[in-house]
Amino acid sequence: MKLLEYEAKQLFAEEGIRVPTGILVSKHEEILLHMDELAGKVVVKAQVDVGGRGKAGGVLMADHDTVIEKARQLFNTTIKGVPVTRVLIEERLDIRHEYYVSIAIDRAKKQPVILFAETGGMDIEETAQKEKNAVRSVSFCPLLPDVPNFLLRELCGDSPAEIQKTVNRLYHVFCHKDALLAEINPLVTTPDGVYAADAKLIIDDNSLARQGIAINRDLSEREREAEKHGFSFVELAGTIGVIGNGAGLTMSTLDLIEFYGGRAADFLDVGGGADTERVMHAVRLVASVPSVRVIVVNLLGGITRCDEVARGIIAAGVAIPVIVRIAGTNAEEGRKLLSEKGYEMLDTMDHVVKKAVEVAG
Amino acid sequence: MIYGDKKTGVIVTGATGRQGEYHIGLMNEYARQVGGRGVVAGVTPKKGGLSVHGVPVYNTVKEALREHDATTGVVFVPGIAAADSIMEAADAGLELVVAITEHVPVHDTMKAISYAQMQGCCVIGPNCPGLLSPGEVKMGIMPAGLFLRGNVGVISRSGTLTYEVVDELTRAGIGQSTVVGIGGDPVIGQTFADVLEQFAQDPETKAVVLIGEVGGNLEAEGARHTDVPLVAYIAGVSAPTDKRMGHAGAIVEGGESDARSKIARLKKMGIPVASRPSEIPGLIRDLFRNHC
């Protein structure tokens, strides 16, 4: 789950990373309560989860006299289509130099990887493309509690010692918060020391519970409803509803729909060992997506019993046509139950998808 | 076959849980059919002394190893405890740990794999269906009825999609040497490259099917360094960017982690890539025709 800048900065500060003094508001009128704290120059920043926020107009410069007007501007706009519901007003830093630091997971090495550049800021991606050596990277054993000093030296070169310390503190955030990504861009030097001028943090969805996060905000309401039933669910833009078991098989079913010229409305993986009730909820959930004209059920029973699946489809009793392919454990019995109720059944993945594309038109 | 055979003794961690108990039954049913040793002991903390389907349960892996000869662990404990079980198995001296568990925090996985590596223990998974060598051994949850012994290896990041492909192969009369589910998480123990290295040394395996999906770029990395004849299939050509498609690791995050880029890279190496699972048996036949 992605955190917003102000949330990430709070967590960074807890690990000893310096962040600018800031005020979070959800209405521009709230700023009036803080006017005496806003004596000097400030930065007004939309709290939206959007890449390239600065270039998209989500960060405005202001001072004591213009701050309310600038905040109002942000609340009345959208940044790359995302409405602004919260604005962070921060003291403007006297920036001498901008660095870039990012910690992620290297899948191939199975280790944390730290990226560092001596020229950070909004153009980091272009810089990285233009100059091959502009971004340095190191990875190391995940059992170490700190980034070893020799790697910090290798990574940060001649940068001030405080920069190296900040990189190590960011690694602490990365570990303690179960992050998939922890990033500061730009990490800046000022006459008062080093500050994280921006902050990015993505928490591993498998660790939300132990991080005390009850609700995954990245999911839509329907996706959250699906999660409660133990489904993986993604809403898409097409007309063919998809229910499968297992992420790979379900993904493959979506691809096959595209192969035969159709468009899938969703990805729903009922998970292993789905019983009558779960299948019923799955069928009803997919049927509730307004664009769905036909539902494909593609289940390969291993742990999942096909007779249970059939009972679930029947119990859902939706008006939209449901075309079924079930194979594996108790498939015969499942097919018998469904054919008695007049459901269309086909024997392979190819056949069932082809048929659904025809029905969807 | 790779990673084990009839003689392999297996210890199941999480033996008294719902999943563990159910699959000990199925693994040992398979072992009886093929005349293998199967699961020789189970482990659940504080449940030592119980037995599951006639398999004795111990409090720790070390205790189990004092009474039984085993080299491989299969882990069924919940996500939050999986890393600990992997490290325990490695520390006790098992050579291979197959972690079936889903929803393991990725930081835990990184640490557990690192630790196991230091103990000389090899990890398959997590979030995987395990492996099956037809007629020899089943370590995990694959439905044994679909398999046929033969010369084709299968490596996959998925569960049911693997069964789909195995079913296609079997119905086409193409048997399998070993089918390995390496797992759908962003960080996994054995990757395509590691399993291909094992297959390269296996005289039984003449070709390998790689089943990949969106996220990361380990399929092409694995294919690059092997001489084993390959056929590939990549799921997720229709997957949107930045959306997790069921598996924690199945997410297009820029770079070359989307399905089309992966397919293009594999094709550039001369590897035939199926556009749907039902094309795989035909591509394998073509491969055998060209290589024999």
Image (cartoon, helix red, strand yellow):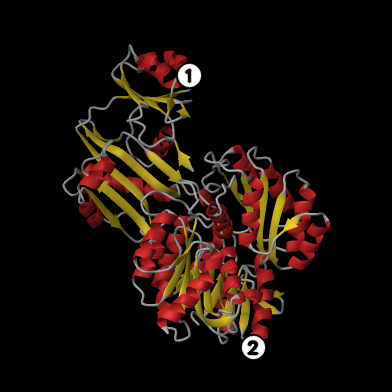
Query: Disc 2 and disc 1: Cα gap in Å?
Result: 72 Å
Residue positioned 34% across, 69% down in the render: B224
Res B35 label: 2
Same chain letter for marks 2 and 1: no
In the rendered image, residue A18, in percent from the top left (x then y), is placed at 32, 35
Which residue type does callout 1 highlight? Lys
Residue positioned 57% across, 48% down in the render: A262
- Residue nearest the observer in this picture, B245 or B283: B283
Q: Secondary structure at mark 1?
A: loop
In the rendered image, residue B253, in percent from the top left (x then y), is placed at 41, 49
- Against A134, residue A345 (above or below) is below
Neighbourhood count class around disc 2 (C-alpha, 10 Å): few under 14, some 14–19, many 20 upward: some
In the rendered image, residue B215, in percent from the top left (x then y), is placed at 44, 55
Residue positioned 66% across, 60% down in the render: A299
The picture quadrant where one finds residue A251 is: bottom right
Q: Secondary structure at mark 2?
A: loop
To which residue does mark 1 refer? A27
The picture quadrant where one finds residue A191 is: top left
Which residue type does callout 2 highlight? Gly
